[in-house]
Image (spheres, grey):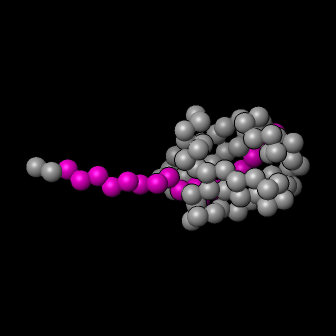
Amino acid sequence: MSISSVEVRPLAVDVSCNNDALHVSLADGRGISVPLTWFPRLLEATPKDRNNWRLIGGGLGIHWEDLDQDVSVESLLRLR
C-alpha cells in the first residue's frame, strides 16, 4: 500500500497586533502569537501603522507598507 502526502503550506487569513504580540490566524484554524520584540519595527510602530498590513503571496506572508516590514508565515512557525 502506498501513502501519498500532500504538502500544505500554512496560509494567513487575519493579523492583529497589541502592544506586546503579533497574532496571526491561519486558514487551517491554527493561531500563531509571537512577541513583538522579535520585530523591532513593529514594536516601535504606532498602532495605526501596525494595523496597516496586507497579506502577500495569497497568505504566505504579511507586509506592512509604512514600516517596510515583511514576515512569512513559515518563519513564524519556525521561530516558535
Q: Is residue 73 left or right of residue 48?
A: left
Residue visible at 54% across and 38% down? 78
Residue farthest along the left direction in this orientation: 1
* Magenta region, main secondary structure: loop
> Quadrant of residue 59 in the image?
bottom right
Read off the magenta span: 3-19
The residue that appears at 15% across and 51% down in the rendered structure is 2
Q: Is residue 1 visible?
A: yes
Q: Tell me if 43 is positioned left or right of 62 in this view.
A: right
Residue 51 visible within the image? no
Check the image and report above or below for 62 versus 21. Answer: below
Give x and y (percent) for residue 5: 29, 52
Residue appearing at x 76%, y 34% in the figure: 37
Percent across and percent down for residue 73 are: 58, 49
Look at the image and say whether residue 57 sits in the magenta stretch.
Answer: no
State the image coordinates of residue 20 (x, y, percent, origin top left).
77, 36
Residue 33: quadrant of the picture: top right
**Front residue of 48 and 58:** 58
Instruction: Tell me if 49 is positioned left or right of 23 in this view.
Output: right
Q: Which quadrant would the C terminus be assigned to in this image?
A: top right
| Residue 36, x across and y down, in percent | 75, 38
Q: Residue furthest bottom?
A: 58
The residue depicted at 82 percent of the width and 45 percent of the height is 41
Please tell me whether residue 9 belongs to the stretch shown in magenta: yes
